[in-house]
Image: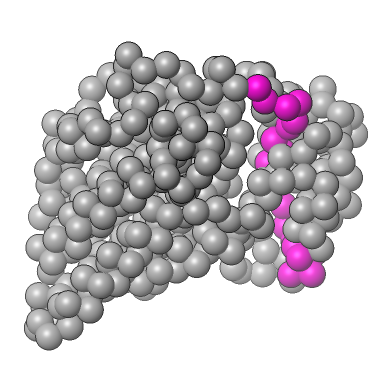
Amino acid sequence: MTEVKQYPPSTDAPTDHGSAKLIFNWLKLAESALGNNSDRLNAINIFPVPDGDTGSNLYHTVAAATRALENVDEDASVGRALNAAASAALDHAQGNSGTLIAVMLNALAEPLNDASRLTAPLLSLGLQRARAAAWAALSDPQEGTMLTILDTAAATASNYRGSITELPEDSQNSRKTLGEMSSRIVETAWMAVEETENQLSQLTEAQVVDAGATGLLLVFDALRATIKGESLDPDILDSIHGFHMAHPHVHEDMDVAEAYEVMCSVQLTPLDAATLRIGLNDIGNSVIMSPVNTEEDGDGTIRWRVHVHVAEPEEAMQLIRPLGSTENLAITPLHDDTTVDPSCSPDAEASTEERN
């Protein structure tokens, strides 16, 4: 894992909040924050599986989003930029947490498709869609996770949007109003992160907060800092349980049953997508399925990102393989730190397309 040694002192955000540079600055700052804190996020990663990789998964997923913007014109609209970043993040997402944050970015981009700039009303609408998409993507959603933080952020944005309806339109859409909304989101998200310790029995017993929820808090603080042209809050994690260097890696003392994480992208019809979700729910858990885009090809299919935990990866591949060629296929044992090469996995018949 590539570690970022220091937080950037500031975002150097442009005075305008309508260019692709704002999205790049946000994701680059989020990437930095996640890189700095990935070790501690991994240390408290015990739900849904104590495999100690949430920080790494979030970092690499956001890094994929940032890379996708390197060739985007910095004067492009925020909608175009966020769409490019979100699609890349979802297509290259790693783990539960990485997939969920990619789902969030993908849904957040929807109302910005035709927007020239990011505004408080559009951010509120985007977070509502992100909340709905994240809950829909999971077959077994749980409170006390990233979903709770996203719920809180969406509710905070909605409430704030309701409080500014009497303002002139220019004020509602100003950068100052957007900055105030982002600050309130971070404040309430921080409180929601602390509460996750009391919402899941595993976290309560270990006396830690949810790792994915904490990572999402950092992403929201990066958004706040970018919008306002400020630095990340250096004290935002000071009170988070399990987040000091002296604290142990909680997950290391927990047993992980032998199981595998299977992730891939595949073109599916609506019927195939529904059938695959049912099949994966029958054989595994932590099922996440989300469309990467909504544009059908000539065969009536759209691109989906698929994630599941299974005892035997071949069982999942027997369901996925007949539906089409997979891309960005990754099969990772949850009980150790080794990623299985698809060519060496139980899926011995994996095609070249599946390994790309």
Percent across and percent down for residue 3 are 37, 20
- Residue 343, quarter of the rendered image: top right
Q: Is residue 268 magenta?
A: yes
Query: Is 93 positioned to the left or the right of 257 in the image?
Result: left
Percent across and percent down for residue 63 are 42, 36
Which residue shows up at 59% across the image and 64% down it?
136
Quadrant the C terminus occupies: top right
Q: Is residue 322 above or below residue 2?
A: below
Percent across and percent down for residue 177 are 13, 66
Q: Is residue 273 above or below residue 229?
A: below
Q: Is residue 15 above or below residue 127?
A: above
Name the residue nearer the viewer: 26 or 250: 250
Name the residue nearer the viewer: 107 or 68: 107
**Residue 356 visible:** no
Q: How many marks?
A: 0
- Residue 111, quarter of the rendered image: bottom left
Looking at the rendering, the stretch of residues picked out in magenta corresponds to 255-274
Name the residue nearer the viewer: 4 or 66: 4
